[in-house]
Image (spheres, grey):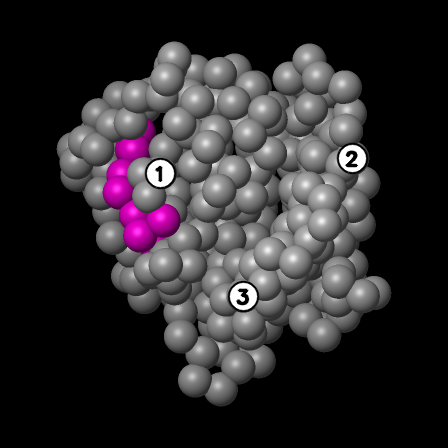
Amino acid sequence: MRWEKGRRDGNIEDRRGMGGTVAGGGIGVAVIALIAYYVFGVDPQTAQQVASQIGGTTSSSQGEAEVGTPEDRAGQFVDVVGTNVNDVWEQYFDGYRKPEIVLYSQGTQTACGAGQAAMGPFYCPGDSTVYLDLSFWEEMETRLGASGADFARAYVIAHEIGHHVQSLTGAMQKVRQAQQGARTEAESNGYLVSLELQADCYAGVWAAHASAVSGGAVALEPGDMEEGLKTAQAIGDDTLQRNAGRRVSPEAFTHGSSEQRMKWLKHGYETGDPNACDTFGG
């Protein structure tokens, strides 16, 4: 993926090295699982298994990233990709309000409660902010089998900003209302699956327009989409359940199967049209 010469708007708050550690084992893992379920819609058993596998992701405390260090390059990457994703969405929404992006290490406080790397990158609608502990990418790649390619990581950022778009369109709020009227947990989870798959589709829409809005400074290269699909496959609910030693339980899915996630990421990219991302009825 080409990105080094992409535009950066500096819309990032860097909390790396500021502490805010959240316990990673024992009761801490259980708390993470409950937060993940009630705030982010992650099945608590899956969240607890994955958090336990990752071991609470305790990245070493970092000071401010110095120019030329891996941490600084990672921060630049997030800035470029986040800026590019927002530039794409500004083409579709008049008065588009971009989300804040926070980089942190280990744990941090949010308007949605305590966040930790073991929960993965997430979007908090309470403060319209995407939270990223960049050490999670390495854990996702080494323990979950996701791709380490730049586009695979960019896909994750675009997915989270896709949730911000859903908050702006009201889709996220409608899902919450629908969940309140759900008769079963499986029905409630089904709404979450549709929400997550739409965010995957939105990530594909971004990828389709990344080059056009940046004058080619940010663009996919041959093989990039395949790496993104590899990551989508690795973080499907069925694959995560299998890797956690559990039976595959579709009724407990909250993000979609590997096949579904791959399908909608690819669909967004091939159509380049957010209106084609009707995962609720299409």
User: Residue 67's spot in the image, x, y percent?
Assistant: 22, 42
Residue for point 81% across, 40% down: 259
Q: Above or below — where is 65 with respect to 277?
A: above
User: Residue 195's spot in the image, x, y percent?
Assistant: 64, 56
Q: Amino acid at mark 1?
A: Gly
**Quadrant placement of the C terminus:** bottom right
Residue placed under numbered mark 2 in the picture: 250
Q: Nearer the viewer, residue 106 or 111?
A: 111
The image quarter containing residue 70 is top left
Dot 2 or dot 3, earlier in sequence: 3
Q: Is residue 181 visible?
A: yes
Residue placed under numbered mark 1 in the picture: 115
Q: Compute the Cα span from label 1 to label 2.
A: 26 Å
Q: Compute the Cα span from label 2 to label 3.
A: 24 Å
Residue placed under numbered mark 3 in the picture: 173
Element carrying mark 1: strand
Element carrying mark 2: helix
Dot 1 or dot 2, earlier in sequence: 1
